[in-house]
Image (spheres, rainbow, N blue to C red):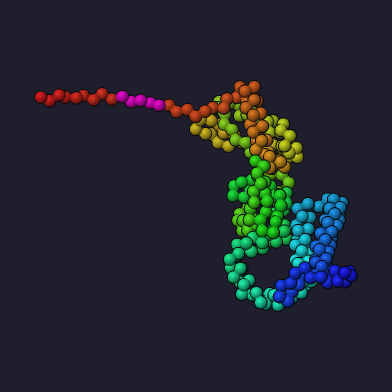
Amino acid sequence: MTIKEILEFNLFEVGNYSLSVYKLGIILAIFAAVRLMLWFFKKAMNRRWKQRQLDPGTEYAIYQIISYLVWVMAFVFVLETLGVKITILIAGSAALLVGVGLGLQQTFNDVVSGFILLMEGSSKVGDILDVDGQIVKLQKIGLRASKVINRDAIMIIIPNSMIVTNKVINWSHQVQETRFKVSVGVAYGSDIHLVIRLLEESASEHPVCSKVSPSEARFIEFGDSSLNFIVLFWSTEMFTIEKSLSDIRRTIDRKFREHNVTIPFPQRDLHIKSSTVDFKQER
């Protein structure tokens, strides 16, 4: 067989459509060219972003949008190679698309929400989010769902529409530091100025505490069994802050013991009133 005969050899035929060795080679070449082009594009973006020191989340969003568009164009070229006319295909399957659209309404909503996340930039890869009261880090924005990881290192799949339509707190948005607080009560009669100094020292000594924005302790109220204080500090370590809060509480407890500052526990006085009842025996 000649090369021309090999290239024109039909692997299979379905109605008026056939797949020859030549067409299969074109299809494989299109997919290989797309993957190679996206690989070079990603490398070029990485170098440019590192030089300008720009946000990696923005880089990821731009790459994802362009890759989706390129793959859609590649799919159209593949259909044209097979002899399928896109306009005729869309017109002929309009009713079917309506039915599929109604059945997959939530899926389409998630897909549109994914494009909104990528283009809007309100939540980007690497951001720390509060979703339904759970603190998570955004790992990947997919076409339908996003991957996040919580503080227990568990990967969670969240539909994109949940991030777009629900109330979500983005701890990484706009500001680099977030304020945290530790609450504590001390016994009545304690030296207030000493307590405030010990609280501020306990927070400032921890490495996650910001050196630019100093910690601040406040006397907030007279409680039922204690004088209540809070110590406020700023930190950029938002995702692992729970461990830091535990460390600061341990430091506060140690300093209070060293300076004889007592952390009271609730006490209640119970008064028992006795009464004498006279019983008369009737005969």
Residue farthest along the right direction in this orientation: 2
**Above or below, 6 relative to 47:** below
Picture quadrant of residue 244:
top right
**Residue 269 can be seen, yes or no:** yes
Picture quadrant of residue 22:
bottom right
* Residue numbers of the magenta segment: 270-274
Q: Quick check: is 273 in the magenta stretch?
A: yes
Q: Position of residue 108 (x, y in %)?
A: 64, 64
Q: Position of residue 262 (x, y in %)?
A: 57, 25
Q: Quadrant of the N terminus?
A: bottom right
Q: Which residue is drawn at 72% across and 31% down?
A: 205
Q: Where is residue 206 in the image (x, y as percent from the top left)?
A: 71, 33
Residue farthest along the front direction in this orientation: 1
Q: Nearer the viewer, residue 124 or 227?
A: 124
Q: Which residue is drawn at 73% across and 39% down?
A: 210
Image position of 127 (left or right of 192)? right
